[in-house]
């Protein structure tokens, strides 16, 4: 009787999980497998004219200077995302978790960048950076810093910085919400005990908040890491990877090769390379953080 109930329970669980597993395997596992398969072909992406070429796409990739340049830009994005978005998100979460007035209003204002579509955000900031009538150059001229005016998205020296600022503006609210959720799980009694013992705000943060937020920070760092390695949309909307490849990312380069130049085999090789890089770096981060925690 107990065995029958257990089988019935497992059958019910499988029945409800089956649709999710089907979607996951169809769009993730199957998609990754087909990406590696297409990377061994010479194929335009249209029709059935596929020519097997083995690992030639990967050999070409290893000798392609643009793929290493785009990987460097992705790693810069990773560093900026982790060193700017996470601390800023934690700072905003601490502010919202404090006793100041208007936290509901501030929560809405801080989260607004996440409510905008990526295309709208890209157009908005492109107008902000516009060299002729953009708000940034107008402000610099008004405060007497006209010498600093620039074509921010059209210059190889400033384009990447301008895009990184926009990305941080858009995604910091995501980490703010994650940090805020982590803060709500910290018992208030710990802070009360710290105040009784004479601990200041800085000491409470260092010895209570930060250690108990370690898991939340780790999850946020992994999300930021993976997201930065496969980032595409905002960069493509604002610069298309230009000027002269200054803001080229692996995903934008993959898109150009696969869907603009109709070289689906080489584009798939770049996508497979992105997958392997993200898997390797994420595994290293997970392993190192696990060893520290143990």
Image (cartoon, helix red, strand yellow):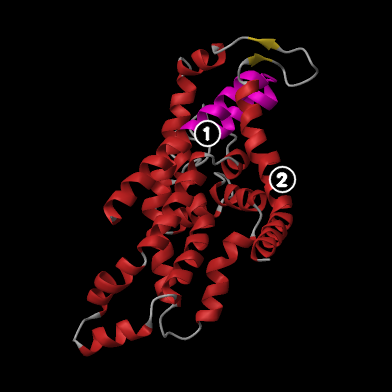
Say whether residue 157 is visible: no
What label does residue 275 carry, if any?
Answer: 1
Which residue occupies the extreme right position in the image? 47
Q: Which residue is mark 2?
A: 22
User: Residue 179 appears in which quarter of the rendering?
Assistant: bottom left
Residue in the image at 42% along x and 44% along y: 78
Identify the secondary structure beneath mark 1: helix
Q: Quadrant of residue 117?
A: bottom right
Task: Identify whether 144 is placed above or below 160.
Answer: below
Of marks 1 and 2, which one's residue comes earlier in the chain?
Answer: 2
Q: Nearer the viewer, residue 289 or 263?
A: 289
Q: Which element type, helix, strand or loop, lies under badge 2?
A: helix
Outermost residue toward the bottom in this view: 196
Q: Position of residue 243 (x, y in %)?
A: 53, 31
**Are circles 1 and 2 on residues that touch, CB within 8 Å?**
no
In this view, the residue in front, 185 or 236, is 185
């Amino acid at each position: 009787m107990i065995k029958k109930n257990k089988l019935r329970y497992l059958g019910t669980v499988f029945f409800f999980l089956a649709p999710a597993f089907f979607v996951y395997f169809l769009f993730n596992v199957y998609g990754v497998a087909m990406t590696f398969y297409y990377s061994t072909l010479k194929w335009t992406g249209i029709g059935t004219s596929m020519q097997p070429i083995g690992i030639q796409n990967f050999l070409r990739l290893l000798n392609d200077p643009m793929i290493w340049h785009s990987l460097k830009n992705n790693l810069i994005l990773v560093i900026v995302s982790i060193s700017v978005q996470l601390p800023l998100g934690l700072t905003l979460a601490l502010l919202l978790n404090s006793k100041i007035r208007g936290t509901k209003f501030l929560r809405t204002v801080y989260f607004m960048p996440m409510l905008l579509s990526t295309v709208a955000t890209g157009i908005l900031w492109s107008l902000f950076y516009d060299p002729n009538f953009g708000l940034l150059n107008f402000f610099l001229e008004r405060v007497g810093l006209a010498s600093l005016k620039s074509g921010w998205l059209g210059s190889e020296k400033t384009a990447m910085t301008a895009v990184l600022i926009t990305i941080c503006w858009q995604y910091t609210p995501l980490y703010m919400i994650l940090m805020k959720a982590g803060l709500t799980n910290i018992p208030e009694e710990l802070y009360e005990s710290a105040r009784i013992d004479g601990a200041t705000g800085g000491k409470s943060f260092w010895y209570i908040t930060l250690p108990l937020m370690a898991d939340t920070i780790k999850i946020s760092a992994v999300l930021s890491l993976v997201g930065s390695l496969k980032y595409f949309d905002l960069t493509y909307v604002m610069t298309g990877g230009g000027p002269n490849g200054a803001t080229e990312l692996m995903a934008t380069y993959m898109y150009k090769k696969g869907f603009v130049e109709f070289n689906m085999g080489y584009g798939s090789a770049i996508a497979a390379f992105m997958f392997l890089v993200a898997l390797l770096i994420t595994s290293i981060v997970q392993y190192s953080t696990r060893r520290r925690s143990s």
